[in-house]
Amino acid sequence: MDPLLEAGLVETRRHFFARSAGGIGTAALASLVNPDLFAEKKATSGLPGMPHFAPKAKRVIYLFMSGAPSQLDMWDYKPKMKEYYNKDLPDSIRNGQRITTMTSGQKRFPVAPSIFKFNQHGAHGAWVSELLPHTAKMVDDLAVIKTVNTEAINHDPAITYIQTGSQLPGRPSTGAWMSYGLGSMNDNLPAFMVLHSTVNGGFGGQALYSRLWGAGFLSNRHQGVSLRSAGDPVLYLSNPAGMSDSMRRKMLDELGRLNRERFAAVGDPEIQARISQYEMAYRMQTSVPELTDISGESKATLEMYGPEVKKPGTFAANCLLARRLAERGVRFTQIFIRQWDQHGNLPKDIRRQCGIVDRPSWALVQDLKQRGMLDDTLVIWGGEFGRTIYCQGGLSTKNYGRDHHPRCYTKWMTGAGIKGGIVYGETDDFSYNVVDKPVHIHDLNATILNQFGVDHEKLTYRHQGRDFRLTDVHGEVISGLLA
């Protein structure tokens, strides 16, 4: 469409009020009844009346294991399964539940017990696999949730579901909802930042799409900002060759003037969002290099995270950056690490993955704890679903694979008012069905919001004629996880 014609068709607020029967009088009355409705808000502010009640958490660090780590080989100890080695999964356990096309053609579903040793740790004797020696040392700080469940059975809809509350793309991500409702605590960094971790120098595994940290139908200023592991931490953040800081400032000032004129003409709120994002990018030219410079960290801190911490883009380096982001008031930090999709050769691959994440995950919690930040920082660890007790492909005493399993899997949480030293919920002997205290992903997200003082039923956004929320029309806060 021709830009001039488009501008002529746009109805501004002035035109709307002039033509309305109630006109300005109605708007004036509304402003008296609810002054916050028409109050001008800074780009970093949240919604009026938020949080709904006193929060326990100020910030969250979400360690997302993309690809679905096997709960059976890490957390959900099932010693009885040794008796079932290579026996078919009983029909009474599966009970006709759907499975993926990757194993639906198998003639049989042989039980594959974990080859890894489990031991009890902590004051309450939580069972933890030998794969996680560092995490095992801090189980008294963790709420280990063994009964997380979801309806999604394939990766992309499952990750989209847990991140946005819907299996269909287009909804705001959890971090975007946080930014929208609570705003930012730092004018120089976004409220929501995303870190992608390399594995053996690359990413691999299931693709991760930007909608997982996108803003959906919210203003684009609430979307997550990704930090890169090589080159400029944020694309196009640095000035191009030949442009000085003063030239950049002059250009932004002139661009801001033009955008304000356009906003006055058409009243499009996305124009204001664009202005604020340009200014944020300008401030990030200083704040991001300072953030990523870890030369001031103590030797003891660096050693705690392990030898990979000095390699940009590694999980260890990202865990340290997450702590630095938390210190600087970033409300939501999400770290993704892929290659947990272990349909075959699981023992070798999961040992590698646990070797990458175990020590840095432990170090992050210890780092926050010793700085007094764990009290108001929520840390979450886990993936999009779990793994089956039956083997995919060939089974031997030393090797096996596992298919997707959404019916029950394990995540852990710590900090910010979460009860430590507990194992929540129980699964059957085959880690196939929940038998006590189920936690649906909507319940998990409701509980996360609760720790920020947010009633998940009240954090809504009206779009296409209905009110949307992160938990859709479901979700209950799991009080048993709260201290």
Image: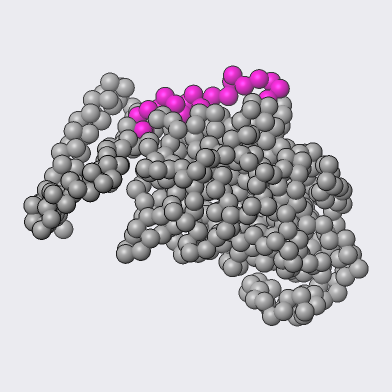
- Seen from the viewer's position, the closer of residues 4 and 442 is 442
Quarter the N terminus occupies: bottom left
In this view of the protein, can residue 145 be seen by the observer?
Answer: yes
Residue at (78% x, 67% y) in the render? 428
Q: Position of residue 125 (x, y in %)?
A: 85, 47
Q: Which of the two residues, 75 or 309, is positioned nearer the viewer here?
A: 75
Q: Residue at x 50, y 59 (%)?
A: 471
Q: Position of residue 329 (x, y in %)?
A: 49, 31
Q: Would residue 133 be found to the left or right of residue 267 on screen?
A: right
Q: Main secondary structure of the magenta part?
A: helix
Question: In the rendering, at what x and y percent does residue 373 appear?
Answer: 61, 30
Quadrant of the rendered image containing residue 358? top right
Residue placed farthest to the right in the image? 83
Q: Is residue 83 left or right of residue 178?
A: right
**Quadrant (top left/top right/bottom left/bottom right) for the C terminus:** top right
Q: Is residue 124 above or below residue 330?
A: below
Nearest the eye: 349 or 11: 11
Residue 383: x %, y % from top left? 63, 54
| Highlighted range, magenta | 280-302
Task: State yes or no: residue 300 in magenta.
Answer: yes
Q: Quadrant of residue 225?
A: top left
Q: Work out whether residue 216 or residue 58 is closer to the camera in this orientation and state it.
A: 58
On the rendered structure, is 322 left or right of 363?
Answer: left
Instruction: Decide whether residue 159 is among the magenta residues.
Output: no
**Picture quarter containing residue 153?**
bottom right
Residue occupying the point 64% across, 52% down: 479
Is 274 drawn above or below residue 111 in the view shown?
A: above
Residue 336 appears anywhere in the view: no
